[in-house]
Image (tube, rainbow, N blue to C red):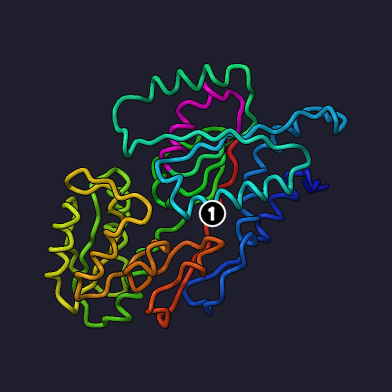
Amino acid sequence: MVQSPVDAPGAMISAFRSAEPRLTRNSTPRRLAPRGQVVRGLAVLLLLGAVLQAAAQAPAPPEERAPWRVVLIRNWDSLYPVNVMREQAMRRTLVENASRQVEFYPEEIDPLRFPGGLEPRLVGLLQEKYSATPIDLVIASGLEPLEFAARHRDTIWPGAAIVFNGVIDGALQGWKRPPRTTGVTMILDIEGTLDLGLALVPAARKVYLVAGNSNFDRMYLDIAIKAIPKARKPLETHFIVGLSQEETASRVASVERDALVLYLTMLRDGRGQIAGPGSPNIARVAEASRAPVISAVHTQWGRGPVGGWSSRFEFASALWRSRHSRYPLRSRSRKVIQPSR
């Protein structure tokens, strides 16, 4: 394990900021950074939470220093390729930059496939599990893990800091951030994606939104609805929402050629069918549509949609496989939320 001399919060914040290149709508597109370069900034921020807590304690000789204990609380999508790759890069960089040993404790919640009232029993189990194992940092990947950690941190992991990632900007409106909590949000760039669609179909007057009926699907739909009025020209909004996968493809097939189809997410359809990693539904929708299918989620590109604007992950360029790659690929920076005390 590589030992890093950087163990000061101020230096880590500077390193994080310097690792975050910025692109604006008018910036010239460029190739994304190679694996590890962009995620390094996120990993430094994640390590910051543990460092802030450890810094308050008197230093001990290296051989006597306790390891940093980090809980990784994930969501139902933990096995999606995008999240597997992100977590691998994060863990690798955390270990390489740590000045002491790091122990990881993976946990998972799954409200998509198990929506029943299991949370009280899960909280009790985790409280018993960690009763003799103090945790320094809880890393929440996604909105639902963040909400779970915020509700139950003091019961399960008292004293731990919380750092979140994988949360869409706008999903935290009205949310009161707990103390010792920070994180990085991603932009679901509906406005930029619509701009791309209008560049492909300048005469478009309608946009059809495709989404499922899970809570996550509805969250994406709400964000999209709020963003559509910001498009560079007025668009009449139509909804293909909450149908079965078969019904969705059939409905999309009737969309006009000079319209746009904005595919959001369809994690659970109208019949309760769950779409896991590699689901063919998005390809089925794109194949059925006579109009361009666009998406603000870069992991959907190359599987049917012609492209869009998306938050940048460090491996995003490798996922651009669409035959429409001549269309401009754009990326916006993530938003850093400063730590609360």
Residue nearest the observer in this picture, 189 or 131: 131
Question: Does residue 244 lie above or below 331 as drawn?
Answer: above
Outermost residue on the right side: it is 61
Residue at 30% x, 77% y: name it.
Answer: 198
Do we see residue 29 in this rendering? yes
Q: Where is residue 247 in the image (x, y as percent from the top left)?
A: 13, 57
Residue 274 is left or right of residue 120, and the answer is left
Q: Position of residue 274 (x, y in %)?
A: 28, 46
Question: Does residue 94 lie above or below 321 as drawn?
Answer: above
Residue 74 is left or right of residue 304, and the answer is right
Do we see residue 192 in this rendering? no
Residue at 55% x, 38% y: name it.
Answer: 72
The overriding secondary structure of the stretch rendered in magenta is: helix
Residue nearest the observer in this picture, 79 or 148: 79
Residue 250 is left or right of residue 1, and the answer is left
Residue at 55% x, 45% y: name it.
Answer: 183
Question: Does residue 304 lie above or below 59 as drawn?
Answer: below
Q: Mark 1 points at which residue?
A: 85
Residue 274 is covered by the magenta coloring:
no
Which quadrant: the C terminus? top right
Amino acid type, mark 1? Met
User: Which span of residues is magenta-colored?
Assistant: 143-162
Q: Is mark 1 on a helix, strand or loop?
A: helix
